[in-house]
Amino acid sequence: MKKAEIKLLKSKAVLELENNFEKFQNSSDTLKKFVEENSEGTKLEFTIPNMYPENDFESARNLFNSLKMLTTVQASDERIWIYLFYSVFNEYRIERLKKQYPSKEPNLKTIMSNTLFTGNNNDKIRAKFLNYLSRLWWIGYFFQEDEKSLELVTKKDFAGIMTSYFSTTFTSLKSVRYGTLDAVKKFIVDNPDFKAVIKTIDGTCYGLGIRNLLVESNRFINRLSSAIIVDIYNKNEISDLVYQNLIKHYCVKK
């Protein structure tokens, strides 16, 4: 398979791109050339993975496995992702936008949010989970040991799940991530009509309802942390605690 080098878009070029995005956006070739000419090599090479605009699960798994050498600090660097998105993965970027907006062109601010780390994403933590490319790496990183959880959170409402749950503090803890998703999967299995149950309590069921369950789980973990150091619990203990809270919140009559 073909290999490519990870490069860094120069900080000055990032600002120029952000400030003159409309001009660049009108010409994909001009934009790609600008990115290539204003980037510096890192000597880090990777095998270019197969990417599927219609399948975030496969794309996330493939992208993370190809770029597994990145540290979390490197994977938080907008200069890497902007370079990759507008050069190595430029064709994927174009097709991904077509899939997301098949009937009409989105406004400029929306495109900037999806492909840069700016627009309405001045919070860079939130931004890396909205950028179409970087969020695939991050979800692959979060669930590299659990493909079933990876598939579940990428199936529908992916952007909403990423920004509402994975940008929160406690998801940095592996035990919380894996334990919470184990509890969510168990809740779904034990409650076949779980979307109707969610609507009864929350009013709105987002996508498949996964976001609702994760947001409630995060609220519970935050309450728990006010009295106890969450780090002392292992994955199985977190799973049991979160599951019991989901049952109490959604299934026990008030």
Image (spheres, helix red, strand yellow):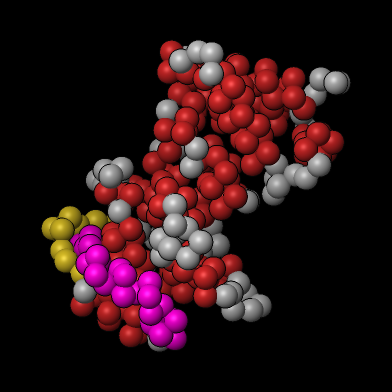
Q: Quadrant of residue 87?
A: bottom left
Q: Is residue 3 magenta?
A: yes
77 displayed left or right of 44: right
Q: In front: 220, or 252?
A: 220
**Image vertical order of residue 23 relative to residue 244, above or below:** below
In the rendered image, residue 235 lying in the magenta stretch gets the answer no
| Image quarter of the C terminus | top right
In the rendered structure, the answer to whether residue 11 lies left or right of residue 190 reads left
* Horizontal and vertical percent position of residue 104: 64, 79
Q: Residue at left 31%, top 70%? A: 15
Q: Quadrant of residue 247?
A: top right
Confirm whether residue 182 shows in the render: no
Residue 181 visible: yes
Label total for image: 0
Residue 60, above or below 183: below
Image point 68% across, 39% down: which residue? 212
Q: Position of residue 51 (x, y in %)?
A: 43, 61
Q: Is residue 28 above or below residue 110?
A: below
Residue range highlighted in magenta: 2-26
> Considering only vertical position in the picture, is 114 above or below 149?
below
Q: Residue at x 30, y 68 (%)?
A: 14
- The quadrant of the image that shows the N terminus is bottom left
User: Residue 144, position in %: x, y?
Assistant: 41, 38
Q: Residue furthest left?
A: 43
Residue drawn where x is 58% and y is 67% of the image: 100
Q: Is residue 193 left or right of residue 232?
A: right
